[in-house]
Image (tube, rainbow, N blue to C red):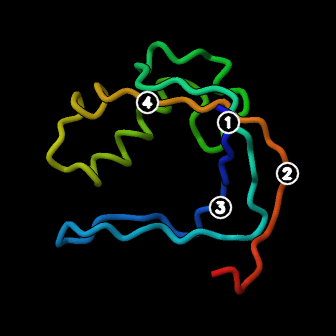
């Protein structure tokens, strides 16, 4: 707890190419949200996710059922050898964040 997380906008999603090599997502480094991690729950089932975890969700999932569908859509592509039941059995992790500020990285930061 207490470490920082940077949340950037995904410009183009990552994927696995036909050879099975991962192509990382393209991220924007403008208006990055910096947040302090104030809580963490690892490997919780979808049915155990408290409804209040969805009140400030970034994205399309506003219920455990919607999150489960989104995760299946994502991981059916990236884990093609896993069945839907195996993907769902992995559960999810939850990070509780406290937003501290927004920043933009300079173009020459690398």
Q: Name the residue under label 1.
A: 37
Label 4, label 2: how far apart the Cα atoms are: 26 Å
**Residue sitting farthest toward the bottom:** 108
* Residue in the image at 17% along x and 72% along y: 19
Location of residue 36 (image quadrant):
top right
**Residue sitting farthest toward the front:** 2
Task: Name the element at disc 1.
Answer: strand
Task: Name the element at disc 2.
Answer: strand
- Point out the tag, 1 or 2, that comes first from the N-terminus: 1
- Point out the tag, 3 or 1, that comes first from the N-terminus: 3
Q: Nearer the viewer, mark 4 or mark 1?
A: 1
Crowding at mark 4 (Cα within 10 Å: few <14, some 14-19, many 20+): some
Location of residue 55 (image quadrant):
top right
Q: In the rendering, at what x and y percent does residue 110 appear?
A: 62, 81
Q: In this view, does 89 lie above or below 102?
A: above
For the residue pair 36 and 24, the one nearer the viewer reads as 36
Q: Do the residues labelled 2 and 3 touch (CB within 8 Å)?
A: no
Crowding at mark 3 (Cα within 10 Å: few <14, some 14-19, many 20+): few
* Residue in the image at 29% along x and 65% along y: 16
Label 3, label 1: how far apart the Cα atoms are: 18 Å
Q: Name the residue under label 3.
A: 9
Q: Do the residues labelled 1 and 2 touch (CB within 8 Å)?
A: no
For the residue pair 85 and 27, the one nearer the viewer reads as 27
Q: Which of marks 3 and 1 is in front?
A: 1
Q: In the rendering, at what x and y percent does residue 80 appear?
A: 19, 50
Q: Mark 4 points at which residue?
A: 92
């Amino acid at each position: 707890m207490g470490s920082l997380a940077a949340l950037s906008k995904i410009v183009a999603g990552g994927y696995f190419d036909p050879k099975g090599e991962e192509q990382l997502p393209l991220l924007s480094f403008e208006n990055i949200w910096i947040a302090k991690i104030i809580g963490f729950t690892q490997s919780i089932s979808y049915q155990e996710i408290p409804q209040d975890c969805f009140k400030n969700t970034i994205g399309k999932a506003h219920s455990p059922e919607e999150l489960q569908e989104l995760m299946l859509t994502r991981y059916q592509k990236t884990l093609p050898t896993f069945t839907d039941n195996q993907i769902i059995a992995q559960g999810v992790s939850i990070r509780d964040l406290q937003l501290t500020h927004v920043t933009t990285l300079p173009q020459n930061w690398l």
